[in-house]
Image: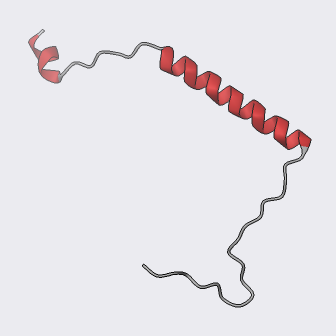
Amino acid sequence: MGYILEPDGVDFIIQSKPLTKKEKEKFIAFIEERKRLNKIKSSMPTKKRTSRKTKEKA
């Protein structure tokens, strides 16, 4: 695999602008909420799966 050369006038380096204080707080709140929801989901017991053959015999 070779290198990709940058065409003249095109820059492949992306510089993101820094987040504002409000954006940063929103992002942190979003991440905390997702972590909380994932923790709840992972602590829920899972259903035991049964095959169709087991159901038909009963």
Describe residue 28's horizontal placement relative to residue 51 as left or right.
right
Could you say which quadrant of the image residue 56 lies in? top left
Q: Is 9 located above or below residue 32 in the figure?
A: below
In depth, the one of 29 and 52 nearer the eye is 29
Q: Residue at position x 16%, y 15% from top? A: 55
Dividing the image into 4 quarters, which one contains the N terminus?
Answer: bottom left
**Coordinates of residue 34 in the picture (x, y in percent):** 64, 30
Describe residue 58's horizontal placement relative to residue 36 as left or right.
left
Q: Residue at position x 90%, y 41% from top? A: 21
Could you say which quadrant of the image residue 22 lies in? top right
Q: Is 27 located above or below residue 10 in the figure?
A: above
Q: Residue at position x 81%, y 36% from top? A: 26
Which residue is at the far top? 58
Q: How many marks?
A: 0
Which residue is at the far left? 57
Describe residue 5's horizontal placement relative to residue 31 as left or right.
left
**Coordinates of residue 29 in the picture (x, y in percent):** 77, 30
Q: Residue at position x 16%, y 22% from top? A: 52
Could you say which quadrant of the image residue 28 lies in? top right
Which residue is at the far right? 21
**Coordinates of residue 32 in the picture (x, y in percent):** 70, 28
Which residue is at the far bottom? 8
Q: Is 16 located above or below residue 57 in the figure?
A: below
Dividing the image into 4 quarters, which one contains the C terminus?
Answer: top left
